[in-house]
Image (tube, helix red, strand yellow):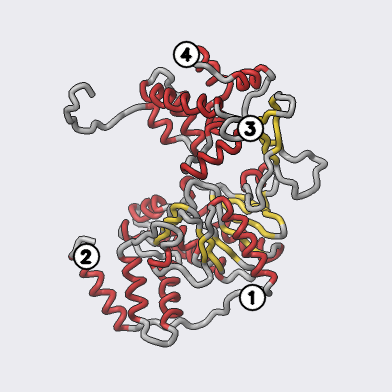
Amino acid sequence: MQTMAYGPRKQISSTVIDAAKAAKGAAGKAKALLATEPGSRYSLFAWQTIKRTLLYSAKLTGVIADSIVEIDRAMKWGFNWELGPFELWDAIGLRRSVQRMSDEGDEVPDWVLRWLEAGNESFYRIAAPEAESPSGTVAKRFYVAAGSDGRYEFAEEEPGADDISLAALKESGRTVLSTSGASLIDLGDEVVCLEFHSPNNAIGGDILTAIQRSTEEVSRNWRGLVIANEGRNFCVGANLMLLLMEAQSGDWEEVEDIIRLFQSSMLGLKRLDRPVVAAPHRMTLGGGVEACLPADQIIYSPETYFGLVETGVGLIPAGGGSKEAAVLAAQRAEGGEIQPHLNALFETLALAKTSTSGYDVGRLGLKRPQDRVIARQDARIAEAKRAVLELDRAGYAPPQEKRVRVAGREAELCCSLACRACSSAGK
């Protein structure tokens, strides 16, 4: 910094950074970064940065906003933070972090100190429904707020009409069935949500099993199904490591079985006799796209990066994505020349194109007439639930199976030549 001379970037090796990478979720990563090695210069850098933000937020509570909720929402909605300042403070440990601030000579706002002196350990708390609460009651979230007499106490956070929290529903015991990779959750009004929660929400055997069990359960007992989750990304694709291991061992029959399970699970969604609405967000790639395309409708969040990217790792979309692209081409041809529509979609798949937003999905040719984008990502689950109920009230009937027109030998030759051209161009 003194000489401003250029130096090559050095690869950093640190147990602190490794621990933060391995931790799950924003809360877990922040805690690992600050608590693994308090003496580490990486932890110290993060602490000095975060500490100033937390103290500044506490100082301005009641000045720039009425409560901590508004400050947290402003940072999440306006700056794309995963946790607001006070949610982050709770995640790293309120009492311990305040003690460290005091030990380092920082001025902690009086209201925070009084809050701790009253025996409180966090700014937020979740209260599960009491045993005598009516069935369907959701866990409540409370936050610290100043009362009319100036004393601070917990106030109940009023959820908006478009705010559905899957975490709160699970806390309330609304899980219908669950596997290690996915859960079926009761959203109320006889609608359930299939939530992925595997690492990176990658689709493996546990999620495929959950999909098959869910379609059977929904057909018997529910009005419809929403496919959504609250992960960082909707789904980064199929668990390719599983396929790689089987391929390396030469167990091609097992590879066939995995692909067949994937295809049959997606067909089960497509043929379900109840409406299905998918609500993807952020990274929705490969198998994530193939889990959305069987739905009767897709509700995109504005920040949706949607694409069949399998060719990027030397594979062909085999979970139904290639087939759905062919169906879209036939529908758009409407009895006319099908080849131009197939060419456009084939190029999207061959070059592993991905949308830059929910609005951009149409450019790739993967957006259908019934699909739409909503303005606020947090409302996607509620909007998907409404769409399911509207389809049900309209007298939903599953799509009838019918023959799909394809292009024949000419298209096969065209695709073969295109593959060679892409290969020679290094794509």
Residue 196: image x %, image y %?
54, 51
Q: Nearer the viewer, mark 3 or mark 2?
A: 3
Q: Which of the 4 image quarters holds residue 425?
A: bottom left
Callout 3 crowding tier (Cα within 10 Å): few <14, some 14–19, many ≥20: many
Using the numbered discs, state the Cα–Cα distance from disc 2 to disc 4 in whole angstroms: 60 Å
Q: CA distance from mark 3 to mark 2?
A: 55 Å
Question: Which residue in the protein does label 1 denote?
Answer: 397
Q: Position of residue 266 (x, y in %)?
A: 51, 65
According to the image, label 3 marks what residue? 124
- Helix or strand or loop: what does disc 3 sit on? strand
- Say whether marks 4 and 1 touch (CB < 8 Å): no
First reached walking from the N terminus: tag 4 or tag 1: 4
Q: Residues within 10 Å of mark 4 (few under 14, many from 20)?
A: few
* Lateral position of residue 310 relative to residue 372, left or right: left
The answer to whether 246 is drawn above or below residue 141 in the figure is below
Label 1: how many Cα within 10 Å (few below 14, some 14–19, many 20+): few
Give coordinates of residue 399: x percent, y percent: 57, 76
Mark 4 or 1, closer to the camera: 4
**Which residue is identified by label 4?**
104
| Residue located at (31% from left, 29% from top) | 13
Kindly report which numbered mark, 1 or 2, lies closer to the viewer in this rendering: 1
Residue position for label 2: 423
Disc tally is 4
Neighbourhood count class around disc 2 (C-alpha, 10 Å): few under 14, some 14–19, many 20 upward: few
Which label sits in the foreground, 2 or 4? Answer: 4
Going from N to C along the chain, the mark reached first, 3 or 2, is 3
